[in-house]
Each structure stands twice: as C-alpha cells, then as structure tokens.
Image (tube, rainbow, N blue to C red):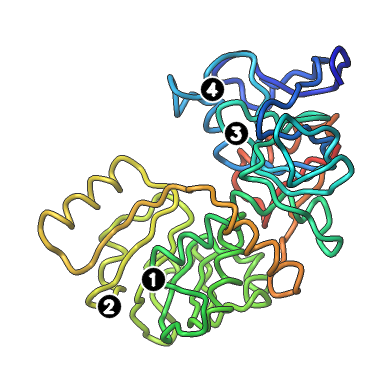
C-alpha cells in the first residue's frame, strides 16, 4: 500500500468539537512488527475520543497533531507486518487500535496483533465495532466487583447507572448472564429497552426514586457499576450493603479522593475507580458471547465516514442509546 492515499477525518488542535474535525486525504499507513493493516469496515465513537480532543488528557494525548481519533474498529486484513503469523490478508477482524496513535476515522488503519481477534460471520461490522472499549469495560467492571462468569457466582444485587448507554447496556446483559439481580437507571424513553436486555427493575433517573437510586423492591446493592457522572457518594452510600462497592468507570478527581478516604478510614463500603486494561482474552470472551446470541450490541445510529462529524456531535450530546457507529 506504500505511496497510496486514503480518506480520513482528523483534528489539528484541542477543542472545536464536531466543527474541529476535517476531512483529509493522507497516506495509507504501513504495518510494523506485530501489526496488521486493516481496510476498515466500521468504527465506534466513545466519549473517551472527544474527551481527548477537548484536552482532558493533555499533555499525554494526543502525542501530536494532526490526530485521527477512534480506537474500536472492524475491518479486513489488507497486509500483515513482519513476524505476523496469526492473521493473513482477507481475514475479518475486530480490533482495538493503539490509543496514542489511534486512526479509526479512516479507510485504513494499523492494528496491534495483541488486541485483535477474528470476527465471526454472526457478528456484523457495526456490532463488532461497538465491542472493544464498551463491552470489555463492562466485563472488567463486573469482574472488579467479584463476578467470575464461571457458574459459581453467588446471587447478588447490582445497580447499573446509565444502563442504556454504550457501556451500561453491556453491563446489564453480562450481569444477567451471571444470574445477578439487576436494578438499572436510564431515561424514560429507554425503560422498555433496558428491561428487554434483562434488567429486573428499571428506574427513570429523573424521578425522585431514580435520583435517590432506591430499589423498587427495597434491596440494598452489593455493588454498583457506575456508568455516568454527577452522582455523589452520599447518594450511593445509604443504598449499599455493609460491604458494598461502587465501581466507577469514569472516575473524577473527586471520586479518586473518595476512594483514598475510604481506604484510610478502613470503611467497609468502597469506591473503586476502574480504568480499562485492554486484554485479548476479554475481547475474545465478549465476541464469543455475541456469536452465541447471549449478548448483543445495541446500535444507536450509523453514519458514513463522510458525515463523521454528525456522529461526533451525537456522542458529545450524551444521550445515545447504545453505540454510535461510523461505517466506511
């Protein structure tokens, strides 16, 4: 592919939102050792992507401008780098790109072999692109709470906030697979969807009970998978069991401070900040579950690469139901 060019979408500085994205023609990248070049089929937009654009991780990300965002992709292997034996040209895959170099909003991208798995025919490109960050975060959050997924899980009560969002809708499905009792919060328009994904109780977060996180059956929660922001520890605390935990997937500085305070005071109730640690075995696990029909990716909307800024704006708006997909 050396010397050939592709269509891509990048931004050249911090800020700007959807208006900061520019459609450009750039050279097709070349795969290095333990990398593969993918002809992309789809990518999904995660809040992480536009938070990087806003400068929330400066000076670490992005390492340089201009920068092509998005890490979760599906595609067909076009070329393999030196030493790659596990994939060949023509293979269909699901991959998580290197965060620091990203590249998902383009016709081609280079993917690291350790974070790439085969995409079975039962999994569409759009569904597959929704998995790497969101479904793996959901899985790791439940594991952090002690869920094993090996048939030995004890019955537990779990609360899932923002249960219709990109991560939340996977947490609901995975929690039910582990036979947990699920109470979930979401907006009124998504109550039926979240019930259909397996939630036992669903709260409209704008009602008094929803705002206070009170279980309709008066259960205390063994743990909470917290998939949104803006809920104080003082709201969670009275709803937890004696040893209850809050697993926070978008931890703020205040959340980290609460976590430290709970450790210093030897509190039995804990707040646990979670940061995604990409693992091939976790990605394989969720891909297999979709293949077997045990979980599914809820697709909020699909957008062509030529209208990537519409998808970007929709993600920033913060009310997506499931995953926002850009197709090549």
Mark 1 and mark 4: Cα distance apart in space? 34 Å
The 10 Å Cα crowd at callout 2, few under 14, some 14 to 19, many 20 or more, is some
Residue 98: image tag: 3
Q: In the rendered structure, are the residues bearing label 1 and label 4 in contact, judged by CB atoms less than 8 Å apart?
A: no
Residue at label 4? 62
Q: In the rendered structure, are the residues bearing label 1 and label 2 in contact, judged by CB atoms less than 8 Å apart?
A: no
Quarter-wise, where is residue 311 in the image?
top right
Question: Percent position (x, y) of residue 258?
Answer: 23, 51
Residue 111: image tag: none
Relative to 305, does residue 282 appear above or below in the rendering?
A: below
Residue at label 2? 241
Which residue occupies the foreground of this view, 239 or 94? 94
Secondary structure of residue under mark 4: loop
Mark 3 and mark 2: Cα distance apart in space? 39 Å
> In the rendered image, which quarter contains the N terminus?
top right
Mark 1 and mark 2: Cα distance apart in space? 15 Å
Q: In the rendered structure, are the residues bearing label 3 and label 4 in contact, judged by CB atoms less than 8 Å apart?
A: no
Circle nearer the viewer, 1 or 2: 1
Seen at 16% across and 52% down, the residue is 261
Question: Percent position (x, y) of residue 284?
Answer: 65, 59
Circle nearer the viewer, 3 or 2: 3
Q: In the rendered structure, are the residues bearing label 1 and label 3 in contact, judged by CB atoms less than 8 Å apart?
A: no
Which residue occupies the foreground of this view, 6 or 309? 6
Residue at label 1? 146
């Amino acid at each position: 592919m050396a010397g050939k060019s592709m269509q891509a979408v990048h931004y050249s500085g911090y800020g700007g939102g959807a208006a900061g994205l520019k459609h450009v023609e750039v050279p097709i990248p070349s795969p290095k050792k333990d990398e593969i070049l993918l002809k992309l089929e789809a990518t999904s937009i995660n809040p992480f992507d536009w938070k990087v654009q806003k400068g929330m991780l400066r000076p670490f990300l992005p390492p340089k401008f201009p920068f092509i965002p998005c890490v979760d992709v599906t595609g067909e292997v076009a070329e393999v780098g030196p030493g790659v034996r596990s994939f060949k040209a023509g293979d269909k895959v699901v991959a998580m790109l290197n965060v620091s170099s990203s590249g998902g909003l383009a016709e081609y991208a280079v993917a690291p072999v350790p974070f790439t798995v085969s995409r079975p025919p039962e999994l569409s490109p759009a569904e597959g692109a929704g998995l790497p960050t969101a479904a793996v975060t959901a899985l790791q959050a439940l594991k952090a709470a002690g869920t094993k997924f090996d048939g030995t899980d004890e019955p537990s009560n779990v609360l899932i906030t923002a249960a219709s969002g990109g991560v939340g809708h996977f947490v609901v499905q995975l929690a039910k697979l582990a036979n947990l009792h699920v109470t979930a919060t979401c907006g009124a328009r998504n109550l039926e969807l979240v019930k259909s994904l397996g939630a036992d109780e669903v709260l409209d977060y704008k009602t008094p009970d929803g705002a206070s996180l009170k279980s309709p059956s008066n259960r205390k929660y063994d743990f909470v998978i917290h998939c949104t922001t803006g809920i104080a520890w003082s709201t969670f605390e009275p709803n937890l069991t004696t040893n209850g935990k809050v697993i926070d997937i978008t931890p703020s500085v205040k959340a980290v401070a609460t976590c430290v305070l709970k450790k210093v005071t030897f509190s039995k109730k804990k707040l646990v900040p979670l940061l995604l640690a990409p693992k091939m075995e976790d990605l394989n696990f969720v891909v297999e579950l979709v293949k077997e029909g045990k979980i599914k990716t809820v697709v909020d909307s699909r957008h062509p690469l030529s209208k990537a800024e519409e998808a970007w704006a929709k993600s920033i708006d913060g009310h997506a139901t499931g995953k926002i997909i850009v197709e090549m």
